[in-house]
Amino acid sequence: MAALFDDLGPRAMTVSELNSDIRGALERRFSNVWVEGEIVNFLEAASGHWYFSLTDGNSFIKATCFKNQNYRIRFMPFDGLHVRCRGRITTYEKRGEYQLSVDSLEPVGEGALAVAFEQIKARLLREGLFDEALKRPLPPFPRRVGVITSPDGAALHDILNVLDRRARSVDIVLIPTQVQGETAGRQIAEAIMLANRFCERCLEQDRIDVLIVGRGGGSAEDLWAFNEERVARAIRGSNIPIISAVGHEVDFTIADMVADLRAPTPSAAAEVVAQSEAEVMGRIGQLSRDLVRQMEYKMLGAHSDLQSLKMAAVFTEFPGRLRETRHRVERLATDAQIAVNARLAKRGEAFDAVSGRLSPARLAAAVAESSKRLSLLNYRAQSAAAEMTSGRNTDLENAMARLNALSPLGVLTRGYSITQKASGEIVRDPHQITAGEPIRITLAGGRIEAEVTRESGS
C-alpha cells in the first residue's frame, strides 16, 4: 500500500527550468542560421546595441545585434532595408521569448560598403563639408610637401619619382601610416592632425605647404579607409591644403569629395603640387627676352621723340618769352613797391591825427568834465533816495496806527477781556458754561486759567 502512494506522477518543472531547457535546445539546433528579410522597428539603444525585427511579409522575428558585434558592420541599418543576417536563435528566459542574435549583416542586392558610402556621403553633404567655398587654393610653388601614405606602397615611389624629375628643390616629408585595414582610417586621420600640430609649432621655413593623402589602386574594401567619416572630418579640419590621390582615375572616395583638390593618381598629385623647374625657367627666360625687346623699342621711340623736340620752334622762342616775362615781373614789383609806400604814408597821417586827439591835456580835461557830471548825478540820486525813504516811513507809521486801532489787542488795553472754553470756543453768554468747567481768560497783560464756581444769568 505504501508503494502505491509514493508514485504520484512525474515532478513538475518550474517556468525558469522550462525556459532554460528550451533555450538550450534552440541554441543547439539553430546555432548558425542565415535569415533574409526586411528590417522594421530598428532602434539603436544608448548602450550601442541594435534592436529590430525581420519580416518576410507574413511573419516576424525579433533580432538583436550587440555592440561588440555591430562595430564591424560598415553601415547603419534602417527600416525597409532588405538584409541577409547570420546568427543564432536564443531566448530571453525571463519573458519566454526567442530572438535572433545577429553576428553579421549585409544588404541584399547591393554591398554593405555601397550602403555605408551613400550614408556617409549624405550625412557629410547635409553638414556642408563638400561645399566649394570651403576648398582652399594650393600654393603655386610649395617648398615642402607632406605625403601621408604607406612607406612600402607604390604610391610613395610614384610621388618621389615625379618630384625628383620635375622639382628637385621641393622637400618631401613622409608621414607613414597604414592605408588599408580596420585601423587604417584612424591612423590616416591622426597623421593629418599630426602634420597640422607640427606646422603650428615649427619655424616658418619648416612648415608643410601642402599634403598629399593617398595610396595606389585596390578593391573597394582596400580603399575603404579613405571613405571613413573620421578621415573626411580630419581633412576638412586641416589648416594645410590637402590633395586626395586615392587609387586609379576610376576610383572615387569620400576623401576625394572633401579634399581641396582631387588627383586621379598619386603621380598626378605630385605633378600638380610641383611644376617643372625647366618649364618655370623657360617661362622666365621668355619673359626676360620679351622685356628686353620692349625696352629697346621704348628707347628707340624716346630717342626719336627727343630729336623731334630739339628741332621744335618752342625751344627757339622760349628764351625771348622768358626775357619778356622777367621784364613784366620787374615792372609789377616796382608798381607794388610804389603802392605800398603810398599806403604807408596815408596810414602815417591818420596815426598823427589820432595821436593829437589822444594827448594828455585833452584826456585830463575830458576826465575832469566827466568827474564833475558824475558828482552832480550822485548828489541828485542821494537826495531823491532820502526823499523817497522819508515818504515811505510816514506812510508806514500811518498804516500801523490804523492797524493798531482796529486790533482786538487794543480793545484789551482799555480793560476788556476774552473768555474761552477749554476747546477754544469764545464765551459770549453765561449759559454757554457750567459750574466746574475750566475756562481761559485773555487780558491785555496775559492769560488766566480759571474754573467756573457758579453760573448766573441776567
Image (cartoon, rainbow, N blue to C red):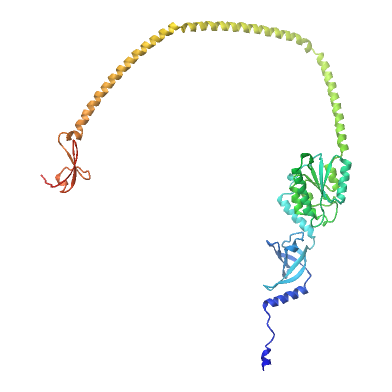
Residue 172 lies, in percent from the top left, at 83, 44
Examine the image and state in which quarter residue 277 appears.
top right
Q: Is residue 273 above or below residue 73?
A: above
Q: Quadrant of the C terminus?
A: top left
Q: Which residue occupies 17% across, 34% down?
A: 413
As displayed, is residue 391 above or below residue 214? above
Q: Can residue 81 be seen in the rendering of this structure?
A: no
Q: Position of residue 74 (x, y in %)?
A: 77, 59
- The image shows a total of numbered marks equal to 0
Instruction: Please tell me which residue is depicted at 34% across the width and 13% down the height of the picture.
Output: 376
Q: Residue at x 71, y 52 (%)?
A: 126
Residue 405 at what x, y percent from top left? 19, 31
Q: Is residue 217 left or right of residue 231?
A: right
| Quadrant housing residue 91 | bottom right
Question: Where's the N terminus, which quadrant?
Answer: bottom right
108 to 365, vertically: above or below: below
Image quarter of residue 368: top left
Place of residue 192 in the rendered image (x, y in percent of width and height, measured from the top left)? 77, 48
Taking depth in this image into account, of 181 and 450 the one nearest to the observer is: 450
In this orientation, does residue 26 appear? yes
* The residue positioned farthest toward the left in the image shown: 458
Residue located at (72% from left, 8% from top): 324
Q: Is residue 345 left or right of residue 452?
A: right
238 or 293, nearer to the observer = 238
305 lies left or right of 63: right
Foreground: 238 or 193?
193
